[in-house]
Image: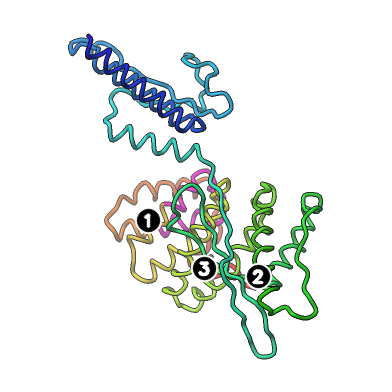
Amino acid sequence: MDYAHTTAKTSSAFCSFAMEQDPECTAERELLEAASTIATFSITAPPDEEQSQPKAEVSCELSKENPEKDKGSKDQDSKASLRPNSSMTTKELQEYWRNEKSQCRQVKLLFEIPSTRIVEHHLSKYVMYKIIILQTGSFDSSKSVIERRYSDFEKLHRNLLEDFSEEMEDMTFPKKALTGNFTDEIINERKLAFKDYLRLLYSMKCIRRSKKFIDFLTKPELQEAYGCLRGGQYNKALEILLEVIGLQERLTRGNPVATVPTLCAVVVCHKDLGNAASAFEYGEKALSHLCMRSSHKYYIPLLEAMITLAYELGKDFLSLQEKLEEWKAKKDPVRVFSLKELAVREYVK
């Protein structure tokens, strides 16, 4: 009994220390409490009682506003009903903690403009600004790198003012000078100005979720990728698509369906390159975003492509076939484009 009390006391002390180190993450704190409770239960319960007693469960309330409210209450909010239990191994508890911790932290993006280059093309001359977009919170190995010129920023500002004039009334945009646009002084000033400009735009939820802002950061690369796809340059298209998909996913976290066309384009490229396993992997991801959107134009073409890939890979295709037949039974027969036919139609001017 003394051993059990000592262990529980040690676990409790560990929980208190963890909360002092990181009081902002409720899920992490409560998971530590859960581990403490589970450890106590596992040690104090006699072996012969484990068969008759229900396994202890500890609720994990995912609430940042008031983590102490209704603590220990039996009537937990159904939206926060994720529960670790005493049957979990240490590894499973650690994995659970990592998942909950990642959900606690809001994904935020940082914008850096470390360098520029001057481009001379026929009779035109302009400055390209290199923009690095990375995620806060930890080392981001999947940072995105894009290039935009002054006229691109100017067009974005003009388009955003059409919808968000009140939100942007206090924002200033660097004006183009009549002379000296290519001096180091002006270029450096604009690097800092555009960095602050992007930061301010991203800080406003209504703007960072707008199609115009997301298009500014992703559309030129997607247009190039789809152009390569239409031209049969699948390796080049795939290279660009894989670079942009990470950024696109982070920009549209609240609307994962928006990434479906890009994911399907990746499927098409992998499929035509003979990478059936990779095509199936990205197809599963796209299909998961459409589980409640069977009316989406990509749903049936994607299902048909996945059935073909599953059959080729020796995977279960019957469940996919059932979904396809279920859809056909509910809908009138209509002409449906193939996945590749849909992909080549994207971003056609």
In the image, what residue occupies the spot 80% across and 53% down? 170
SS at circle 3: helix
At label 3, the amino acid type is Glu
> Which is closer to the viewer, label 2 or label 3?
2
Are there few (<14), some (14-19), or many (20+) residues within 10 Å of tag 2?
A: some
Asked which quadrant contains residue 33, the reply is: top left
Q: Is residue 290 within the magenta segment?
A: yes
The residues colored magenta run 285-307
Q: Mainly helix, strand or loop, the magenta region?
A: helix
129 vs 76, left or right, is right
Residue on which the image places disc 3? 341
* Mark 1 surroundings within 10 Å by alpha-carbon count, few (fewer than 14), some (14 through 19), many (20 or more): few
Q: Nearer the viewer, mark 2 or mark 1?
A: 2
Q: How far is disc 3 from disc 1 in space, using C-alphas? A: 20 Å
What separation in Å lies between label 2 and label 1 (alpha carbons)? 43 Å
Specify which label sits upstream in the sequence, 3 or 1: 1
Q: Is residue 283 above or below residue 51?
A: below
User: What x and y, as percent, mark residue 224?
Assistant: 55, 73
* Residue at 46% in and 30% down: 27
Q: Which residue is mark 1?
A: 281
329, 127: nearer the viewer: 127
Q: Which residue is mark 2?
A: 188
Q: Nearer the viewer, residue 348 or 192?
A: 192
Query: For the residues marked 2 and 3, what is the alpha-carbon distance in whole angstroms?
Result: 45 Å
Q: Amino acid at mark 2?
A: Asn
The type of residue carrying mark 1 is: Glu
SS at circle 1: helix
Q: Does 63 appear above or below 76?
A: below
Residue at 79% x, 58% y: name it: 162
Report whether 119 appears left or right of 292.
right
The answer to which of 289 and 246 lies nearer the viewer is 246
Q: In the rendering, at what x and y percent does residue 260 appear?
A: 52, 56
